[in-house]
Image: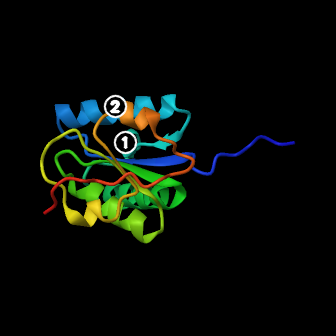
Amino acid sequence: SGILMKKYNKIYLASGWFNENQERRVAEAEKVLRGLGFDVFSPREHQNEHLEFGSNEWRQATFDNDIDHVEWCDFVFAIYDEEDAGTMMECGYAHKCGKPVLIYHEGDDIVNLMLTDSLTAYFKTFDEVKEYDFQTMKHKPYTGEVI
């Protein structure tokens, strides 16, 4: 018999990494998710350094690579804190593609209903993430206030 394949193995990690707090959270998410055995695509690790940052070529290559990996993944794990616009777009695109979207949110700010009502699971701590059964992908709703 062959190796049992996990249904959900490939993760697109959607997050900003543009300040110290975002950098800390995404680095921890990469470590936790890889520690759980997932194949994680983290855009911050794929920034097309061979191209001039901000150039049309860099923009197109980066956009295409990110979109290709949202399509490649089995689900999106998104960090909501500080509401990065790119992250929110990736969540919406993943939802439209029929991919589960899991949201990690340390903060206490109110979450937008477009995410709360499209997500598969909502986490406040990495301990919750470690305890979640990613293979059943059961709904773990957000229960707070929405905007």
Where does residue 18 sit, x and y in percent of width and height? 20, 41
Nearer the observer: mark 2 or 1; the answer is: 2
Q: Which residue is mark 2?
A: 27
User: In this image, 32 relative to 7: left or right?
Assistant: left
Placement of the C terminus among the 4 image quadrants: bottom left
Residue lying farthest front?
A: 143
User: In this image, 70 relative to 147: left or right?
Assistant: right
Where does residue 106 sit, x and y in percent of width and height? 22, 38
CA separation in Å, label 2 and label 1: 19 Å
Residues 142 and 29: in front is 142
Mark 1 Cα-neighbour bin, 10 Å: few <14, some 14–19, many ≥20: few
Where does residue 95 sit, x and y in percent of width and height? 40, 66
Secondary structure of the residue carrying numbered label 1:
loop
User: In this image, 3 relative to 30: left or right?
Assistant: right
Question: Which residue shows up at 17% across the image and 41% down it?
Answer: 107
Residue lying farthest right?
A: 1
Secondary structure of the residue carrying numbered label 2:
helix
Where does residue 84 sit, x and y in percent of width and height? 21, 52
Residue lying farthest bottom?
A: 96
Placement of the N terminus among the 4 image quadrants: top right
Q: Which residue is mark 1?
A: 49
| Picture mark count | 2
Please say whether residue 125 is visible from this viewpoint: yes
Question: Which residue shows up at 74% across the image and 43% down it?
Answer: 4
Please say whether residue 56 is visible from this viewpoint: no
Mark 2 Cα-neighbour bin, 10 Å: few <14, some 14–19, many ≥20: some
Q: Amino acid at mark 1?
A: Glu
Question: Which residue shows up at 48% across the image and 47% down it?
Answer: 11
